[in-house]
Image (cartoon, rainbow, N blue to C red):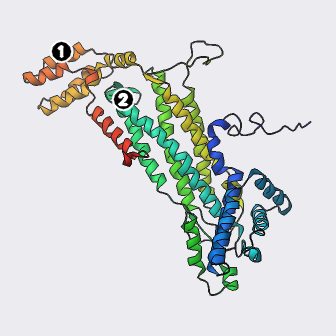
Amino acid sequence: MTTHHALTPLTAISPLDGRYRSRVESLAAYVSESALIRQRIAVEVAYFLALLEHLGLVTGDALDDATGRLWGIAGQLAPDDVLAIKAIERHTRHDVKAVEYWLKEQAKSIAPLAPHLEKIHLGLTSEDVNNLAYGRMYQFAVREVVLPRVQQLLGVLGQCAEAWADVPMLALTHGQAATPTTLGKEMAVFGERLRRAIANTAAITLSGKLNGATGTWGALCVAFPDVDWPAFSDAVIRKMGLEPNRLTTQIEPNDRLAELFDSLRRINSILLDLSRDLWLYVSRHVFQLQAVAGEVGSSAMPHKVNPIDFENAEGNLGIANALLGHLADTLTQSRLQRDLSGSTVMRNGGVALAHGFLAIDSLLIGFSRLQPNGAVLAKELADHPEVLAEAIQTVLRAHGVEAPYEQLKALTRGQTVTLDDLHRFIGQVPLDAQTLARLLAMQPGDYVGLAPQLARAAAAEIRMALPGAAAD
């Protein structure tokens, strides 16, 4: 027997609207069904008013008054108005037509507009409204919600690069001990990657079309043959904050939208790499996780403090990228002049954004609990003096010593060596006193090259890339 429950965080099918609702709430105003309806109304209003002005049907003070009043209705859309539109949709079984009918009812009360109600949605197909509404919805969501949160994480990476610039750490290549680096430099690597990815994403402006049922302006050309419809449409689209695309079928081909989704995938891929590295550093105890009072790490093992935030981020980034990839691939395909397969897919863009947004939130929480473990960092370096072999053989080669690489390979590869072993080897090589003293004094923790400078330079670049930096 089926039992129906009211929709609450505990009865929601999606964890985004259930368990994680409070953490992704800020996206709801941009990518929810209500947000889509608001954007459809905005498109219809902008087109209607522009059409009346262009055709000279309403002018001067009357146009100014009507414009202010109609945008006031659209801008103050209440939840009851959205419900009224959905009630109309239950009869029309068509979401865009429901918006048109509702808007006509609202415009009736505005005297200059009342004689021209049939100009609402004139010459348009639903896709003219939808492509602009979705374009604005996703463009605003990314620019105003998602990217600011990514920039917040970028700022954290910059702070870590600066704070840990001089903290030496054993590097691992192929999972084996390698030339040391610093914690700050490794955070700087991710910071620089993220900085560039943010800039690329922010530079993308979505495109839109406003050209009728098959992209020809056919109906409008018959009704008003003397109007330059492409120029008119370009002006409306630009006023809506999008770039015009004149050559389309019934649908805007979504190449720019796919570019945006692919760019977000690159951001997420960087963060996925970061999440896994941080998890591995915690596993190595390079970082300690600060315990939270009252938190339980395991139902059986009382000692556990688990890297759950990085695991949560990894899982949600994977979901986000799977969805973004499907969106980018699917939305750029349409049979002949139009099919409806992309319609339901398009509605899920907000789901993809929300999973990525949730992952960033988890990473921010995770970073707030990280503390470098100085004792472990120092011990790892002390336990692997063989990493100095690279530096020693390079210096010897620079001084013309024969086959130093091969000699050090025989000494160190697959062997357990100590600093004393390395010092004995160095002592047998004919070197000037200054070079000999420099090699004998070198410790694994000193062998970090330009890592501190690289970390600080990247931190400075990141500071300049953050909002408000130019005003400082």
- Give the number of marks: 2
Q: Which disc is residue 424 wearing?
A: 1
User: Residue at point 61% right, 66% down?
Assistant: 252
Residue nearest the viewer, comparing 49 with 293? 49
Horizontal and vertical percent position of residue 380: 36, 18
Screen quadrant of the C terminus: top left
Q: Is residue 233 above or below residue 135?
A: below
Q: Which disc is residue 457 wearing?
A: none
Q: Relative to 244, is 46 on the left or the right? A: right
Q: Amino acid at mark 1?
A: Arg
Disc 2 crowd, CA 10 A, few/some/many (<14, 14-19, 20+): some
Q: Relative to 472, is 331 on the left or the right? A: right
Locate residue 377: give its quadrant: top left
Residue 335 in view: no
Residue nearest the viewer, comparing 205 with 117? 117
Locate residue 418: give its quadrant: top left
Report how far apart the C-alphas of labels 1 and 2 lie in the structure. 37 Å
Q: Secondary structure at mark 2?
A: helix
Disc 1 crowd, CA 10 A, few/some/many (<14, 14-19, 20+): few
Q: Is residue 330 above or below residue 128?
A: above
Q: Which disc is residue 163 wearing?
A: 2
Q: Residue furthest left?
A: 432
Residue nearest the viewer, comparing 211 with 388? 211
Q: Is residue 429 above or below residue 133?
A: above
Q: Amino acid at mark 2?
A: Ala
Residue nearest the viewer, comparing 281 with 20? 20
Q: Residue furthest right?
A: 1
Residue 10 in view: yes
Screen quadrant of the N terminus: top right
Horizontal and vertical percent position of residue 42: 66, 62
